[in-house]
Amino acid sequence: MSVNRRDVVKSVIALGATAAGARTAAADNSLSLLDASIPHSDAVGGMLLTVEDYERAARARIDPTAWEYIASGAADELTLRSNVDSFRALRLVPHQLRDVSHVTTDVTLLGHTLSHPILLAPTACHKLAHPDGEVGTARGARLADTGMVLSSYSTVPVDRVAEEKPPLFWFQLYVQERGYTTDLVKRAVRSGATAIAVTIDTPVSGARNRQQRANFKFPENLPHISGNAPEHPLVWKDLEWIRDAAGGVPVLLKGILHPDDVEPALKAGAAGLMVSNHGGRNLDTCVATIDALPAIVAQVRGRVPVLVDGGIRRGTDVLKALARGASAVMIGRPYVYGLAVNGADGVKSVVDILRAELVMAMQLTGCASVPRIDSSILGATA
Ligand code: FNR
């Protein structure tokens, strides 16, 4: 079913944006709120207006075993759910009558200016979602004007993905044997990765019971996976040789949750921190990321950027993360759903939806730019 423009306008207005407000925001962000709402219809003709719509449509397209891998969390999935629920429970207290006729969502991260703060988190094996795999994701990142962090578990070699030139291209590192890992970091940097994000929350993976029940197996011969375990699980000291291998390219740490880990991280030379619990896929019952964020931000005191991921499904979630001090956010499952539904265009649509919702939420809370977003718009937790 094609979605006609009048219906879309109606639905955007129903979401709460005035047509004039939508046009102004669109002009300032090179993004049409209306276009962001048109993207596609699903197999049974439903409109794809929200991340949840994409999730439903993706489920109908993805092989059921792969679905269990992508959508599931660890053990009883309490953290998977609380990542989402903790965002939802946080209440906003809007400022009124501030001038929001010109809204800008620009952010600067490690010297790169991006037109909005919604990046693509590293997720494994994109060919499970779409035959274009990570090439489709990189094209989607370009279309959506966003950054992409390529997983070590990519199904496409890093140099091939880099050719698609996403506006910001970082490589996520799972540390394997030292020699192999050193070569891998150098290869990623040679290919054009402008930062390395070392995942620190996976000395072992979590109790992936849904994956076990579905008998999920990773594809064989992934281009950056040796199949051999590291000599020992990663410890702080290893960051020295990883930074050496990166040869001056910034190294960020992904998976920080405890404020006590901030000083060792900065002492080890981390150029940025990603507050993450791996999308609830490792340690079940661990803290929701939006709840872990304030203590990390307080400890960092602006010395390096702090990103957060896990449970972001609405533009209001992005706003709340920024209000709690995040420099930017990353999404995981949502863009994989977009990729499954419509390749690169689907990735773009999901980012556009969140971006349009963020602009709307900024206007509705009286925040005309990212620096104007602060904790004053946060109320109680429901
Ligand atoms: C992940 N994540 C992940 N993280 C990482 O550092 N390396 C990886 O290879 C993967 N692979 C991966 C696969 C799939 C299918 C998912 C869903 C997640 C975690 C990812 O980077 C991110 O932390 C979460 O996905 C964020 O949570 P949401 O947005 O999915 O709720």
Image (tube, rainbow, N blue to C red):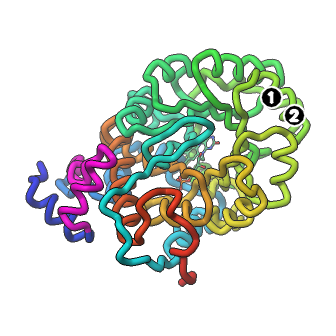
Residue 152 visible from this viewpoint: no
> Which quarter of the picture shows residue 139?
top left
Nearer to me, 136 or 237: 237
The answer to whether the residues at label 2 and label 1 have Cβ atoms under 8 Å apart is yes
Q: Position of residue 295 (x, y in %)?
A: 74, 65
Q: Tell me if 226 is positioned left or right of 21 in this view.
A: right
* Residue 197 included in the magenta stretch of the image: no
Nearer to me, 219 or 71: 71
Q: Name the amino acid, label 2.
A: Asp
Task: Give the residues drawn in magenta, as a range.
Answer: 17-42
Mark 1 Cβ and ligand 1 under 8 Å apart = no
Residue 272 sits above or below residue 378 on the image: above
Q: Name the amino acid, label 1.
A: Ile
Residue 133 sits above or below residue 252 on the image: above
Q: Position of residue 40 (x, y in %)?
A: 22, 47
> Which quarter of the picture shows residue 324?
bottom right
Residue at x 53%, y 58% (from the top left corner): 371
**Numbered badge on residue 238:** 2
Residue at x 71%, y 50% (from the top left corner): 255
**Numbered badge on residue 242:** 1
Residue at x 80%, y 28% (from the top left corner): 242
Residue at x 82%, y 46% (from the top left corner): 265
Residue 102 sits above or below residue 14 on the image: above
